[in-house]
Amino acid sequence: MREFREAVESGDHARIEALLADDVRFTSPVAFKPYEGKAITAAILRGVTRVFEDFHYVREIVDGPESALIFKATIDGREVNGCDFLRLDEDGRIEDFLVMVRPLSAANALAAAMGAQFDRIAEEAREAMGA
């Protein structure tokens, strides 16, 4: 999904959020239970941009409403390889967002960094839902 890729790579958070369905389901590589809804998903994605360094997509695979965006980044000095799996709804918005990362040491560093961000993420989501 080129529009999402461009929004992420340019850091355009408003555009990223506009591409999410209201009932988007976000499955994190470091949390057991998926997150439901646009507000929390957008807040998580903003948090990810604060913890990843040198984030860039290296490949895009599209099959109808489904896309796989393969990325590389650095976190806490560790190279991360990952993939965003996206599925679009009938309106062209992201309804399902699944992230996988490797290696385990990078996933652990991501879990720690996102854990440190989570109070801020939760507050941003609450503010968005109240707006």
Image (cartoon, rainbow, N blue to C red):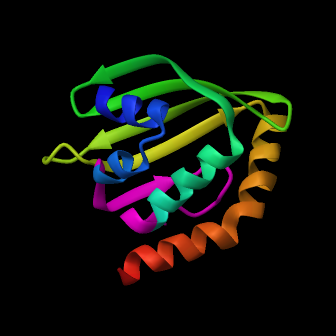
Residue 117 at x, y percent in the picture: 71, 62
Residue 1 in view here: no
Residue furthest to the left: 90
Residue 71 at x, y percent in the picture: 57, 25
Relative side of 92 to 79, left or right: left
Relative side of 131 to 28, left or right: left
Relative side of 76 to 32, left or right: right
Relative side of 29 to 105, left or right: left
Question: What's the residue at 42%, 67% (across, down)?
Answer: 39
Question: What's the residue at 70%, 46% (across, down)?
Answer: 51
Question: What's the residue at 45%, 57% (across, down)?
Answer: 42
Nearer to us in this view, 61 or 10: 10
The quadrant of the image that shows the C terminus is bottom left
Quadrant of residue 53 within the rendered picture: top right
Residue 63 at x, y percent in the picture: 27, 23
Does the magenta portion include 6? no
Magenta stretch: give its range: 19-39
Reply above or below: 22 against 78.
below
Tally the numbered discs. Answer: 0
The quadrant of the image that shows the N terminus is top left
Residue 85 in view here: yes
Does the magenta portion include 31? yes
Residue furthest to the top: 59
